[in-house]
Image (cartoon, rainbow, N blue to C red):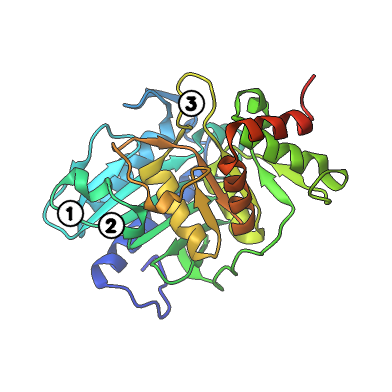
């Protein structure tokens, strides 16, 4: 047994899938800790079917999870590294996965991770995943960092396990606390400021203005470029994460994938009392139109997510005026 469930009541076949995910996660954690000793996990492995660059570990992780799940209750497997859904034998579950999130951070030793989402299988492979995130029965991630942790929800709160490197067992620890009502951190890639829509600029301007601005308090900016690392920080101490759409070609709908990145993170965050939207509408009620569909993504402390949505609700002329009066980055 690699994963201690410690009293959690979940169906046996789902528990078996979680055990298999944990087993691969423990193997990947050991491999990542040895990166460079027997090979370079950050070496280029070409591009995936959606045109994004792959690292060697992206491919290794995808193959490992697929092999581990082939004879489980998972009948449909959807991965960032696979162009289409891969179907196994009979089963009642469908699993979507980003096998290795944040792979650009491998060679600089920054936290990376695995994100997964589990649905009841539908009549077809596509229907199993192109559905509202509210229909997930489990979602979570494994973070490979100073400690390796598995965080998951089965629809009744959020639970956390930490990998014991001696026994290679994920030991359950205290459940994460609900997100705080107020926090002083936000995460966004500020280098793209000039490309953002006016509501996002206005929201960030208010944060940057600090105690002298309309918010009347100082804030700290964080940006790790690893969705799992950003999520783990927010689950630990609150805050808000923004990856909006912008006016660059290919970024009109943001860059994060709805099915296997945003929906599972939104599931976890809402279970922790937070919010998750595309800027205006909830992620969990949205319907992706294809397996690799992208979406803008804003999640974290509920009050801050709601405030971003309020900026988007302003008429365009009012939002533009608001930006003009608070555009602290303007030359």
The image shows residue 273, relative to residue 148, as above or below, that is: below
Closest to the observer, 254 or 264: 254
State the image coordinates of residue 321 (x, y, percent, origin top left). 70, 31
Q: Secondary structure at mark 2?
A: strand
| Left or right: 12 as drawn, with respect to 166 | left
Residue at point 78%, 39% (across, down): 208
Q: Is residue 60 visible?
A: yes
Neighbor class of circle 3 (other Cα within 10 Å; few <14, some 14-19, many 20+) is some
State the image coordinates of residue 265 (x, y, percent, origin top left). 47, 52
Query: Mark 3 or mark 2, which is nearer the start of the sequence?
Result: 2
Q: Secondary structure at mark 1?
A: loop
Q: Secondary structure at mark 3?
A: loop
**Do callouts 3 and 1 mark residues in contact (Cβ within 8 Å)?**
no
The alpha-carbon separation of the residues under discs 2 and 3 comes to: 28 Å
| Residue that sits furthest to the right in the current view | 212
Tag 1 residue: 122
Disc number placed over residue 119 in the picture, else none: 2
Look at the image and tell me in which quarter the C terminus lies: top right
Residue at point 43%, 45% (across, down): 261
Closest to the observer, 247 or 147: 247
| Left or right: 265 as drawn, with respect to 96 | right
Residue at point 47%, 70% (across, down): 157
The image shows residue 203, relative to residue 247, as above or below, that is: below
The alpha-carbon separation of the residues under discs 1 and 2 comes to: 8 Å
**Do callouts 1 and 2 mark residues in contact (Cβ within 8 Å)?**
yes
Q: Is residue 98 visible?
A: no
Disc number placed over residue 7 in the picture, else none: none
Closest to the camera, between mark 2 and mark 3, is 3
Residue at point 60%, 28% (across, down): 196
Tag 3 residue: 251
């Amino acid at each position: 047994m690699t994963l201690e469930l410690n009293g959690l009541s979940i169906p046996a076949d789902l528990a078996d899938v979680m055990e298999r995910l944990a087993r691969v996660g423990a193997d990947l954690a050991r491999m990542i800790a040895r990166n460079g000793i027997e090979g370079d996990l950050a070496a280029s492995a070409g591009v995936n079917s959606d045109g994004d660059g792959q690292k060697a570990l992206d491919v290794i992780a995808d193959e490992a999870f697929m092999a581990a799940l082939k004879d489980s209750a998972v009948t449909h497997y959807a991965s960032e590294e696979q162009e289409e859904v891969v179907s196994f034998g009979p089963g009642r579950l469908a699993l979507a996965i980003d096998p290795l999130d944040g792979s650009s951070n491998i060679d600089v030793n920054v936290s990376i991770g695995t994100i997964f989402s589990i649905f009841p299988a539908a009549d077809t492979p596509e229907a199993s995943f192109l559905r509202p995130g509210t229909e997930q029965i489990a979602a979570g991630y494994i973070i490979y960092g100073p400690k390796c942790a598995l965080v998951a929800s089965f629809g009744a709160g959020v639970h956390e396990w930490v990998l014991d490197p001696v026994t290679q067992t994920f030991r359950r620890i205290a459940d994460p606390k609900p997100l705080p009502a107020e926090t002083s951190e936000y995460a966004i890639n500020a280098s793209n400021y000039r490309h953002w829509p006016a509501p996002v600029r206005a929201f960030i301007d208010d944060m940057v203005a600090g105690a002298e601005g309309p918010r009347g308090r100082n804030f700290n900016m964080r940006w790790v470029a690893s969705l799992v690392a950003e999520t783990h920080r927010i689950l630990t101490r609150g805050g808000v994460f923004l990856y909006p759409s912008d006016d660059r070609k290919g970024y009109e709908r943001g860059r994060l994938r709805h099915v296997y990145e945003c929906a599972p993170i939104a599931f976890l965050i809402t279970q922790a009392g937070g919010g998750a939207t595309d800027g205006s509408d909830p992620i969990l009620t949205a319907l992706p139109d294809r397996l690799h569909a992208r979406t803008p993504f804003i999640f974290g402390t509920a009050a801050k997510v709601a405030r971003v949505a309020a900026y988007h609700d302003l008429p365009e002329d009012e939002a533009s005026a608001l930006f003009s009066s608070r555009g602290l980055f303007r030359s």
